[in-house]
């Protein structure tokens, strides 16, 4: 089978197809970019809509003579966001340090659950090597005036259960 086109015509046809291929590829990339832009646009609008109102409210709190107003506004926003965490973590850390400081060597704490309030509750669960260790731990916690009540299920103190225990500590924290 022979080619009826001359080599110059064959090169011209290949160039035409190459140009069409590049053009279609460029159109496909433009369409993909447009679809991605439209998909991400709602997220961008949602994120920036809340930011502009925070900046406007914090800008009114700034003194007029400062030169770094943007940095101060950003710091105020961060402080406002983290204020509940910063104010609540320090007292609970002290309480947990007190709870863990009197723990005998045979007692291993696996989980700690907390609920703040007027009757605050700390729930401990773990394992112990003997029931005497858990009894000593309970007695040491009851001596602390910060805790109003320390309760352990009777089965743990009587030795009827396995080496696992739960303890509930109540107090004002």
Image: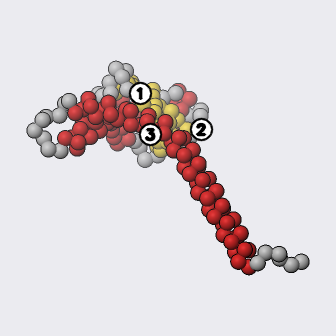
Q: Secondary structure at mark 2?
A: loop
Does residue 72 appear anywhere in the picture?
A: yes
Tell which tag, 2 or 3, sits nearer the viewer.
Answer: 3
Residue at 73%, 74% in the rendered image: 10
Q: Is residue 28 left or right of residue 58?
A: right
Which of the two discs, 2 and 1, labels the residue nearer the N terminus? Answer: 1
Rounded to the nearest angstrom, the CA distance separating label 1 from label 3 is 37 Å
Q: CA distance from mark 2 to mark 3?
A: 55 Å
Which label sits in the foreground, 1 or 3?
3
* Residue on which the image places disc 1: 115
- Secondary element at tag 3: helix
Q: Residue at x 43, y 36 (%)?
A: 45
Percent coordinates x, y for residue 76 in the rendering:
24, 36
Tag 1: Cα neighbours inside 10 Å, few (<14), some, or many (≥20)?
few
Task: Left or right? Give the position of 37 relative to 95.
Answer: right
Q: Nearer the viewer, residue 139 or 146?
A: 146
Colour scheme shown: secondary structure
User: Vertically, is 172 above or below 79?
Assistant: above
**In the image, residue 15 lies at what x, y percent?**
66, 69
Q: Nearer the viewer, residue 10 or 87?
A: 10
**3D distance between C-alphas at marks 2 and 1:** 27 Å
Instruction: Check contact, mark 2 vs mark 3: CB within 8 A.
Output: no
At label 3, counting other C-alpha atoms closer than 10 Å, the crowd grade (few under 14, some 14-19, many 20 or more) is few
Q: Residue furthest right?
A: 1
Residue that appears at 37% across and 32% down: 50
Q: Is residue 90 shown left or right of residue 42? A: left
Give residue 162's mark.
2
Name the residue: 53% across, 27% down: 154
Q: Quadrant of the C terminus?
A: top left
Pointer 3 residue: 44
Dot 1: what SS? Answer: strand
First in sequence: mark 2 vs mark 3? 3
């Amino acid at each position: 089978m022979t080619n009826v086109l001359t080599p110059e015509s064959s090169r011209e046809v290949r160039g035409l197809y190459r140009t069409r291929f590049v053009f279609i590829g460029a159109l496909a990339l433009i369409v993909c970019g447009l679809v991605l832009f439209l998909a991400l646009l709602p997220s961008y609008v949602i994120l920036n809509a809340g930011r502009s109102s925070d900046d406007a409210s914090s800008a009114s709190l700034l003194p007029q003579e400062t030169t770094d107003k943007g940095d101060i506004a950003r710091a105020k926003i961060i402080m406002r966001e983290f204020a509940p965490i910063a104010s609540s973590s320090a007292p609970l850390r002290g309480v947990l340090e007190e709870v863990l400081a009197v723990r005998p060597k045979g007692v291993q704490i696996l989980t700690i659950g907390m609920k703040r309030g007027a009757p605050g509750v700390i729930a401990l669960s773990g394992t112990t090597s003997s029931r005497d260790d858990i009894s000593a731990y309970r007695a040491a916690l009851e001596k602390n005036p910060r805790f109003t009540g320390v309760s352990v299920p009777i089965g743990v103190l009587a030795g009827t259960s396995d080496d696992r225990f739960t303890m509930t500590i109540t107090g004002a924290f």
